[in-house]
């Protein structure tokens, strides 16, 4: 099946706006794992009315922001292997314990990027099918976290829908995604299709349907 | 006579390593990477090694250097891609090295299982993905799981922060990562440690890896920092 290509895509929400929508949906006292890249922005938008504890797969609970240049310690890094800090109340553990937090269902929310999300909640975000295959912790996160949020642009760089009837790329997990935040809309995965929670104020539902494969409804 | 696992020469640490051995290499990226022991393994010259690690090395130091010397036939890891990776990528693209991709949590659990005498376990991770192909499936309470087998090793090369002569180890910050479970899973865990202390200085409350899981220890008080080594374009040997 050839996918529709949209060259004149509407201007959607900025990344910071998407991040703040996710931040508002994370309840006080949640344990959260933010994926590398765009999801990392979420931590900058948490309001003062709540405290969120960040988990990093490499054995760090209570992760803090990037350190100043003179405080960098290459023994204190995040899952993306970048220097980070640890906040008061944080702790270190070994890898099996860290992944027990994930696989044992103790992480409340994880926020990940996506290449494709299907209408039944399948996620593809680890492999384009080309190059050296590398999965990291993505399959554990989607299988184990209580809620799997996806943060992504609605369309690929080539203008193709990322929300699809069926994923064509290798899956990260099957039926795992609960909610998708894009520059066009916030969408829940339901048995009836992609349910619109919020739509970008500049877009109509009809337009959203044209840039989404699979049924969109409100 | 006292128990004393401390060695003074890296060659002594690696004296039992043989061609075809399966070797776990601790660390996550560069945090906890036992670079001096890996360089010792290059000097040792063992070939046809299977390496179990999270990554596949950066630049031409440590694991990157060992792979570059063509001493490794297979890598079992979760993430073999890296901006600074050179040697694995070169050999992989030429078809000269095997790769088994394992989800990171499954990798950790397979290692822990090996260290605890558990031959296999069921997990939900990777169900419905290409990494589940060929694996036994079973349904528990209506949910699908796949069977994953323990990962044993002949040796583990580990970097710790502090040890006494019994091998009671502590690790620094996120440099702990895979190290404690690899010490448990290998027949011989070989530890390079930043600082040796006397047993009476060890606080038993703070020991992360008890000495029963440790075979040999060597003090390397000022280990190579991978990022700096790559910036300085260090090449080993």
Image: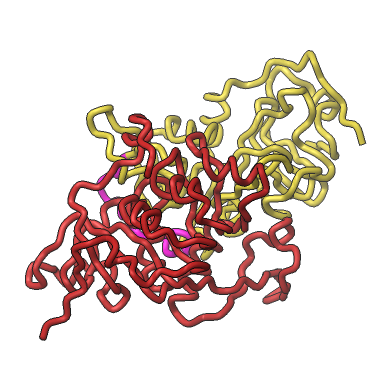
Chain colours: A yellow, B red
Camera-side residue of B45 and A185: B45
Q: Over which residues does the magenta segment extend?
A: A85-100
Camera-side residue of A165 and A80: A80
Residue in the image at 63% along x and 46% along y: B92
Is B42 situated above or below B127? above
Figure quadrant of residue A71: top left
Residue in the image at 27% along x and 28% along y: A68
Is B132 situated above or below B172? below
Quadrant of the image for the C terminus of chain B? top left
Side (left or right) of B235 relative to B104: left
Q: Position of residue A4 (x, y in %)?
A: 87, 26
Q: Position of residue B52 (x, y in %)?
A: 50, 61
Q: Residue furthest bottom?
A: B1
Residue in the image at 58% along x and 77% along y: B120
Residue B226 falls inside the magenta stretch:
no
Side (left or right) of B195 relative to A103: left
Quadrant of the image for the N terminus of chain B? bottom left
Figure quadrant of residue A86: top left
Q: Residue furthest right?
A: A1
Whether residue A209 is visible here, answered yes or no, is: yes
All told, the count of numbered labels is: 0
Whether residue B174 is visible here, answered yes or no, is: no
Q: Position of residue B66 (x, y in %)?
A: 45, 51
Side (left or right) of B174 relative to A71: right
Figure quadrant of residue A215: top right
Residue A89 falls inside the magenta stretch:
yes
Is B134 situated above or below A9? below
Camera-side residue of B87 and B209: B87
Q: Position of residue A52 (x, y in %)?
A: 40, 44
Is A128 situated above or below B206? above
């Amino acid at each position: 099946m050839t996918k529709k290509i949209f060259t004149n895509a509407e201007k959607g929400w900025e990344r910071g706006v998407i991040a703040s929508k996710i931040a508002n949906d994370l309840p006080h006292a949640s344990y959260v794992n933010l994926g590398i890249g765009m999801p990392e922005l979420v931590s900058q938008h948490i309001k003062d009315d709540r405290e969120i504890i960040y988990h990093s797969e490499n054995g760090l609970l209570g992760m803090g922001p990037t350190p100043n240049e003179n405080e960098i310690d290459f023994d204190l890094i995040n899952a993306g292997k970048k220097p980070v800090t640890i906040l008061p109340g944080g702790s270190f553990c070994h890898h099996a314990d860290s992944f027990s937090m994930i696989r044992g269902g103790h992480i409340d929310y994880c926020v990940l990027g996506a290449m494709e999300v299907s209408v039944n909640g399948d996620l593809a975000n680890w492999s384009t099918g080309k190059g050296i295959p590398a999965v990291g912790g993505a399959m554990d996160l989607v299988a184990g976290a209580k809620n799997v949020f996806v943060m992504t642009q609605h369309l690929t760089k080539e203008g193709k829908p990322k929300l699809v009837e069926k994923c064509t790329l290798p899956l990260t997990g099957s039926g795992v995604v609960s909610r998708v935040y894009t520059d066009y809309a916030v969408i829940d995965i339901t048995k009836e299709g992609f349910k619109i929670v919020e739509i970008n104020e500049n877009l109509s539902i009809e337009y959203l349907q044209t840039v989404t494969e699979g049924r969109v409804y409100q | 006579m006292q128990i004393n696992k401390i060695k003074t020469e890296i060659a002594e640490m690696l004296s039992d390593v043989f061609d075809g051995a399966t070797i776990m290499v601790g660390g996550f990226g560069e945090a906890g990477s036992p670079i001096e022991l890996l360089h010792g393994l290059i000097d040792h010259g063992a070939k046809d090694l299977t390496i179990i690690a999270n990554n596949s090395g950066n630049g031409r130091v440590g694991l990157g250097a060992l792979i570059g010397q063509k001493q490794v036939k297979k890598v079992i890891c979760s993430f073999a891609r890296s901006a600074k990776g050179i040697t694995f990528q070169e050999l992989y693209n030429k078809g000269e090295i095997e790769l088994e991709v394992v989800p990171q949590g499954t990798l950790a659990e397979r290692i822990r299982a090996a260290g605890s005498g558990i031959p296999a376990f069921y997990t939900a991770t990777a169900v419905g993905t290409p990494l589940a192909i060929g694996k036994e499936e079973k349904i528990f309470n209506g949910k699908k799981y796949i069977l994953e087998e323990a990962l044993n090793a002949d040796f583990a090369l580990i970097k710790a922060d502090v040890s006494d002569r019994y091998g009671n180890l502590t690790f620094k910050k996120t440099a702990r990562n895979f190290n404690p479970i690899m010490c448990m899973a290998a027949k011989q865990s070989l530890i390079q440690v930043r600082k040796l202390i006397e047993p009476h200085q060890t606080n038993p409350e703070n020991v992360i890896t008890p000495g029963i899981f440790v075979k040999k220890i060597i003090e390397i008080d000022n280990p190579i920092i991978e990022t700096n080594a790559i910036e300085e374009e260090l090449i080993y040997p």
